[in-house]
Image (cartoon, grey):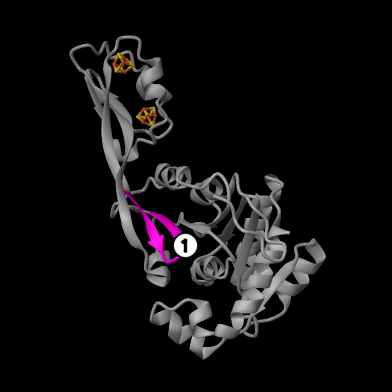
Amino acid sequence: MGLEPAGGVGENMRIAVASGKGGTGKTTVSTSLALCAPGPVQYLDCDVEEPNGHIFLNPEFSVAEHCEVTIPRIVEAKCTYCGKCRDICRFRAITMFGKTIMSFPELCHSCRGCFLVCEDEAIAEDKREIGLLEAGQAGEINFVHGRTRVGEAMSVPLIKAVKKKAWKDGLVILDAPPGTSCPFVETVNDVDFVLLVTEPTPFGLHDLKLAVEVLLNFKKPCGVLVNRADLGDDRVDTWCRESGIPILLKIPFERGIAEGYAKGRNLVESQPDLRKPLENLLREICS
Ligand code: SF4
Ligand code: SF4
């Protein structure tokens, strides 16, 4: 599906909205950008450990799919206790005591290494559910998100499942998990642009630097949106200027935005005069 260009907004664009730390307003920004798109847009909530894009967009779901990963089941009758599966597992998900062999499904990362090294066909495939993928429509916005099971540590396979639903053509906005670890990398690895949401505090700057460092390794284009821009100090401005990272938009702290957030309202509902700057931001990124 193509995005109808309006004033320079291009087709086939994937934009991730990310932040080095949680609580910067990443989800209100990403959902509001989706609402400001001038044509068809898809919103993927890849923050699968704590998805809350649905609170701001109120989608109606028509698809629900359980996400499973493959884990090993040791067939003891065939096992020769050679230990190769235990030795290859970097996650200590298989252990042996003499002729007792045990696997720990919660530690397994489904790398399939143990399946490959077992020469005695003593490992069978089992499945373990890690979460749920839901998809539907929020008005004009095609909406997809994942939710990991409570207590589930493996989020990357669910992020991959969410991303598999991404449109091949058209504008796709991805809400990335906070931080800079594997879930963040999995979300941003193939996008065209990353918008980093930060706040002008020492913590905000610290985590922004980490995120930019990761993105530079990928040679991924990125820019910064400073939220609550009139709180804190100017160190984010100075660092971005010196590092050549563009600050694309600043959103000041407004009590109305904070109150709206608490009620599940996105930025453009709480502060309608932000619609124009957000439309311009989207146009600037796409161009
Ligand atoms: S690699 Fe196969 S045979 Fe060897 S210990 Fe593991 S399950 Fe048993
Ligand atoms: S699939 Fe990979 S992570 Fe899981 S038990 Fe086998 S070697 Fe370990």
- Name the residue rendered at 69%, 50% in the picture: 220
Determine the secondary structure under disc 1: strand
Q: Position of residue 74 (x, y in %)?
A: 24, 22
Q: Nearer the viewer, residue 274 or 217?
A: 274
Is residue 2 among the parts visible in the rendering? Answer: yes
Q: Residue at x 68, y 61 (%)?
A: 9
Tell me what residue is drawn at x 44 percent, y 44 percent: 156
Mark 1 C-beta closer than 8 Å to ligand 2: no
Looking at the rendered structure, the number of numbered marks drawn on it comes to 1
Name the residue furthest front.
4
Res. 50 visible in picture: no
Q: Which residue is mark 1?
A: 141
The percent position of residue 123, horizontal first and vertical second, equals: 28, 19
Q: Residue at x 57, y 70 (%)?
A: 36
Of the four image quadrants, the one with ligand 1 is: top left
- Report the side of 276 relative to 164 (left or right): right
Q: Which residues are magenta?
A: 132-145
Depth check, front residue: 47 or 86: 47
- Going by the numbered disc 1, the residue's amino acid type is Ile
**Horizontal placement of 88 versus 41: left or right?**
left
Residue 279 vertical position relative to residue 167 in the rendered view, above or below: below
Q: Magenta region's main secondary structure?
A: strand
Check the image and report above or below for 256 versus 144: below
The local crowd at label 1, few if under 14, some if 14 to 19, many if 20 or more residues have their Cα within 10 Å, is: many
Q: Is residue 116 above or below residue 18?
A: above
Image check: 168 left or right of 98?
right
User: Where is residue 268 drawn, in percent x and y?
Assistant: 53, 79
